[in-house]
Image: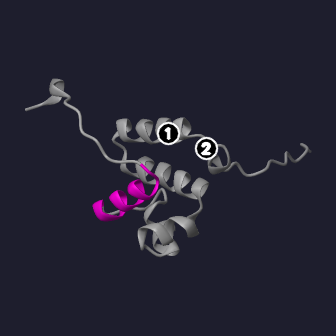
Amino acid sequence: MMAKLETTPFDAAKYITTPDGVIDLLNDALESGHVPYIAHALGVIARSEGMTKLAAKTGVNRQALYTALSENGNPTLDTLLKVMAALGMRLKCEADLKDAA
């Protein structure tokens, strides 16, 4: 019989402690273009800042934030912009002409 390996849950929100860490995670998610990853990354960042504080700043209730910013979430553009503004960030566009029609 093999010994049971015990692990502790990993929560990335505990390790996102600097503005550069926040920016790196969010840029990586946005560059992936994978919506569940983007929502999850925003959720990790939001939890690192505190959901209650973020809910107060955005006017979106805590449960709605948890739902929208989960891996299975699909935040509206309004929620995305409110969360980013509350975190002191903004969405920015840059040209990527190699894939342009």
The first of marks 1 and 2 along the sequence is 2
User: For residue 91: magenta?
Assistant: no
Asked whether residue 93 appears in the rendered view, the answer is yes
Question: How many neighbours does mark 1 have within 10 angstroms: few (below 14), some (14-19), or many (20 or more)?
Answer: some
Q: Is residue 49 above or below residue 98?
A: below
Residue 79 figure quarter? bottom left
Question: How many neighbours does mark 2 have within 10 angstroms: few (below 14), some (14-19), or many (20 or more)?
Answer: many
Q: Amino acid at mark 1?
A: Leu
The magenta region covers 77-88
Query: Please, what secondary structure does the residue beneath circle 2 have?
Result: loop
The quarter of the rendered structure image containing the N terminus is: top right
Query: Please, what secondary structure does the residue beneath circle 1 have?
Result: helix
Q: Is residue 68 above or below residue 90?
A: below
Distance from label 1 to label 2 (Cα)? 9 Å
Q: Which residue is mark 2?
A: 16
Q: Is residue 39 above or below residue 31?
A: below
Q: Which residue is mark 1?
A: 25
Q: Percent position (x, y) of residue 2? A: 89, 42
Q: Percent position (x, y) of residue 53? A: 56, 66
Q: How is the image coloured?
A: one colour
Q: Amino acid at mark 2?
A: Ile
Q: Percent position (x, y) of residue 81? A: 33, 57
The quarter of the rendered structure image containing the C terminus is: top left
